[in-house]
Image (cartoon, rainbow, N blue to C red):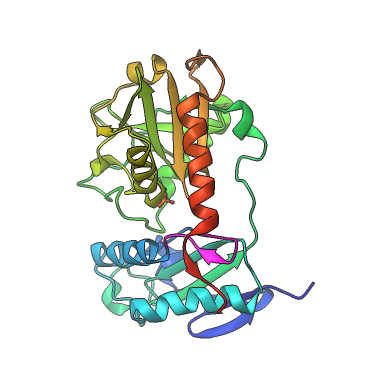
Amino acid sequence: MSELLIYLDGKFVPKSEAKVSVYDHGFLYGDGVFEGIRAYNGRVFKLKEHVDRLYDSAKAIAMDIPLTKEEMSEAILETLRKNNLKDAYIRPVVSRGVGDLGLDPRNCGKPCVVVIAQGWGAMYGDLYEVGLKAVSVCVRRNAPDSISPNIKSLNYLNNILAKIEANEKGGDEAIFLDHNGFVCEGSGDNIFVVKNNKVLTPYTISNLKGVTRATAIELLDEMGYKVIEANLGLFDLYTADEVFVTGTAAEAAPITRLDGRVIGTGKPGPMTMKMVEAFEKITQSTGAPIYK
Ligand SMILES: *Cc1c(COP(=O)(O)O)cnc(C)c1O
């Protein structure tokens, strides 16, 4: 098998040679933004939405990406073509660029643009059938007046701390609360609660505005279930009929245990299963074609 080719500042370089400077502020300070995108069956799912969000994240940290959105989309598609990929996980990264040891971004040159694309199957393996065991964590989600959780930034320590805590407590996924005790999201996915045939999800002030979240809302709407945004507490999760999380990496995944409580019947519920099915269908049949 030939070596994976990585897009790095306009060139395609073999994985073993794809390197950035230790003076890049992405490395020194986590100063930059990223995306996580999937391609299914020769199409990139929601490419425009992901590229738009990448530019929104960049704008929020006052960084100009040195490519147009069209050029970025083409770089993503070309990375897939160069590696003959039809099904893939794609990771565009834009870091602030090479600066000095001070944190002032004005001393950084051009932002560095990387696109990695590789095969990656179901993130949670065979857990989709039994459901994930989640734990709520002590570390709170970044407040919106701190590093906004709406920014998919390279500074993911908040999420990593949650993951470490979940690992420590034996959970497959972490559930974040904000400083008011409201449920925010998982460490890298949005959360949905089903109770008495109603579907609820937190407002996006405290979480990433997930492309999969928006897709799930659309799909549920088409099935005749209006999703209601609400402030939710752990009580709402413990007593839910079903809980599931959504994200590009995780896709749609049921949560059947939380903090030692069994959620609903303890098995992935009917609404969750319908969602998973509809999500699979839409990802297999829509998206930006990679090959002409
Ligand atoms: C990426 C991400 C999500 C999910 O967003 P998608 O657009 O559905 O992939 C949710 N929460 C966090 C913290 C994320 O980083």
Looking at the image, residue 115 lies above or below residue 195: below
Q: Is residue 292 magenta?
A: no
- The answer to which image quadrant residue 109 occupies is bottom left
Given the current orientation, which residue lies at the most extreme bottom position? 11
291 or 266, nearer to the observer: 291
170 or 132, nearer to the observer: 132
Question: Looking at the rendering, in which quadrant would you find the N terminus?
Answer: bottom right
- The answer to which image quadrant residue 88 occupies is bottom right
What span is in magenta? 38-46
Residue 190 placement, left or right of 76 = left
Residue at x 66%, y 40% (from the top left corner): 125
Given the current orientation, which residue lies at the most extreme left position? 145
249 or 42, nearer to the observer: 42
What percent of the width, then of the height, locates residue 55? 31, 68
Residue at x 19%, y 46% (from the top left corner): 145
What percent of the width, then of the height, locates residue 219? 39, 43
What percent of the width, then of the height, locates residue 220? 37, 38
